[in-house]
Amino acid sequence: MRPLSLGDFEGHPVIASESCAFDIIGAQFVREIEPGELVVADADGLRSERVDLPGSRPAMCIFEFIYFARPDSQLYGRTLADCRFEMGQQLAREAPVDADFVIPVPDTGISAAIGYARESGIPYTEGLLKNRYVYRTFIQPDDHLRQLGLRMKLNPIRTVIAGKRLVVVDDSIVRGNTTSSLVDMLFKAGAREVHLRISSPPIKFPCFYGIDMATRAELIASSHSVDEIRRHVGATSLHYLTVEGLQASTGLPESQFCRACFTGDYPIPVPEELAMGKRRFEKSPGNPVA
Ligand code: SF4
């Protein structure tokens, strides 16, 4: 089969899950697919159909803004790098600290770290180098693999870190174990203080809409206070962005989003048997089955 070239897209409509894909092929972004809209691609081309769902509301996953989507993509008309920058600024206002450098956990913490640095006046620098050939660690199947993945994924730049008080900006903490390894790695590289700043609120509730993040028992914030999490991960200090601060950073009303993993307020009620089914397989000390 002949490989596709950029010319093959000229004059043809294109659909993609993220707008950054259009930049790559030189396509023009027209609009987002709307809630309740079905786009059909068949031999006749593209057509749009709508399903009327009375009483429903849009409920975009707010994690797209925090982590999932690429920062150069647009959602709801906003470029995500700008929103993440504002999350970092908001975090600096909510949780200021004296430090020598702000460093990101690359790549997803970068925009928020720049925002934190800009708002706080603390210099931004690279303290962790990313291996570009190892991907997301939080969806790997067990702790050992996740921690091995972290060591393969990130390497500290010792000459930057040694003797310094660091603000370390990351997008989220799911189970906490990857974060523990990260903090340990920074202290072993000579950091004097590690102040963790997280550009999302604590994740307390599982996702029932397709994001395979973790079960409730695995989510460290579902059963631990912020200070307990701080002690678990070994950081000098730990602060999360508030739900209100996160919402303000999107520049959009909360009625547009799903924020259930932070608030427990699911936009579509979760059937009891589904909730039970998910809990049945949760790992916990009292559940030897999992
Ligand atoms: S529960 Fe969380 S991860 Fe799942 S769709 Fe809602 S905001 Fe996104």
Image (cartoon, rainbow, N blue to C red):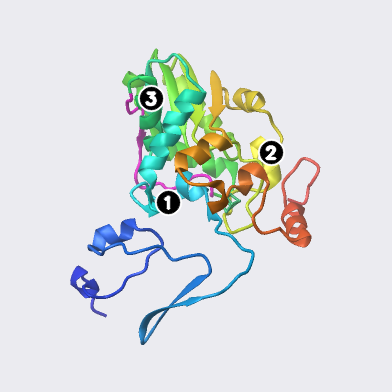
Q: Which residue is mark 3?
A: 119
Q: Residues within 10 Å of mark 3 (few under 14, many from 20)?
A: some
Q: Secondary structure at mark 3?
A: helix
Label 2, residues with CA under 10 Å away: few <14, some 14-19, many ≥20:
some
Front-most of 194 and 42?
42
Q: Please tell me whether mark 2 sits on a helix, a strand or a loop.
A: helix
Quadrant that contains the N terminus: bottom left
Outermost residue to the right? 286
Dominant secondary structure (helix, strand or loop) of the stretch shown in magenta: loop
For the residues carrying marks 2 and 3, which lies nearer the camera in this image?
Answer: 3
Percent position of residue 119, x then y: 38, 24
* Circle 1: residue type: Ala
Between 2 and 147, which is closer to the camera in this rendering?
Answer: 2
Q: Left or right: 187 with respect to 78?
A: right
Q: Earlier in the sequence, mark 2 or mark 1?
A: 1
**Does residue 33 lie above or below 240 as drawn?**
below
- Is 16 placed above or below 279 here? below
- Residue at 36% x, 52% y is 73
Magenta highlight on residue 134: yes
Magenta segment = 124-139
Q: Give the crowd class for mark 1: few <14, some 14-19, many >=20 residues within 10 Å.
A: some
Q: CA distance from mark 2 to mark 3?
A: 30 Å
In front of the other: label 1 or label 3? 3
Question: Which residue shows up at 64% across the image and 23% down it?
Answer: 227
Which residue is label 2 attached to?
222
User: For disc 3, does the CB lie below 8 Å from ligand 1?
Assistant: no
Residue assigned mark 1 = 69
Q: Hey, what amino acid is under mark 3?
A: Glu
Q: Which badge, 1 or 3, comes first in the chain's sequence?
A: 1
Left or right? Give the position of 70 relative to 187. left
Q: Is mark 1 within 8 Å of ligand 1?
A: no
